Image (cartoon, rainbow, N blue to C red):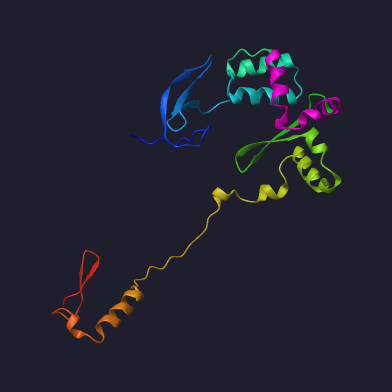
Amino acid sequence: MLKLNVICPHCHGKDVVRRGISSLKLSSKQVYFCKTCRKKFSTGGLAYKTYSPAVIVAALNQYNLGDTLEETARHVNRRFKVKVSKSTVHLWLHEFADLGNYHRIRDEVLSKFGKDIVVSKEFEHHGLNYNFKYHRGKLGWLGPEFSGLVRYIKAFEQGAPDYSQQDERPSQLRIELKVNFETSYNQACKTVLLCCFSHSPSRLNGTGQTGIKKGRWALSR
């Protein structure tokens, strides 16, 4: 039987077997049974949640970008083909508030920048298109000790720096290597042979050489 690489979350035992599938509203989960503590469990996703972590994270991000509860629900439903209500989004905001501290400054950032929070700039660099983004609200909260970094990031609004246009992409760099092939012998084997045979010529075979068979030293006695 194939051994599962699954650890029981209850007793941390490794004697685990599959025990069916748990069907949810929008997905399903593999159920496992621990033979040590005799308990069932499942892995992946969030416990007691109908929607996947991707849907929940997308809703939190979209709301933090300035959308209302209704707009956030519509965006998530259109993107993931689900039916999330604004009340569900509201519950997620309170339940997962400890995942970050941005909710503390969200209202202040919106009052200062409105919905124009994310600055996006597209530019071309050696035939490749790049989409550079930064968060105006979060960047504004950096202290004066990061003033140089702030200026550097804001400079991308005008396009890529001049020095980046002159440098080649790493994948386009050409490195010339000159390789010399030489035949050498294992000096350690030579030393061992000299120690073994310098005082005992009788260990050599009839040809005066050691016999080598299938990569092993065959010493004639």
Q: Nearer the viewer, residue 167 or 150?
A: 150
Residue at 77% x, 28% y is 103
Tell whether 203 sits left or right of 80: left
Specify the quadrant that holds the N terminus: top left
Q: Foreground residue, 197 or 35?
A: 35
Q: Residue at x 24, y 67 (%)?
A: 216
Residue sitting farthest toward the left: 206
Q: Percent from the top left, x then y, of residue 188? A: 35, 75
Q: Where in the figure is residue 185, as x and y percent of width and height?
A: 33, 73
Q: Where is residue 119 drawn, in percent x and y?
A: 75, 32
Q: Magenta segment range?
A: 86-112
**Secondary structure mostly seen in the magenta stretch:** helix
Which quadrant is home to the C terminus? bottom left
Q: Is residue 127 above or below residue 77?
A: below
Q: Residue at x 61, y 22 (%)?
A: 55
Q: In the image, is residue 24 part of the stretch drawn in magenta?
A: no
The residue shown at (72%, 46%) is: 161
Residue 102's spot in the image, x, y percent? Answer: 77, 31
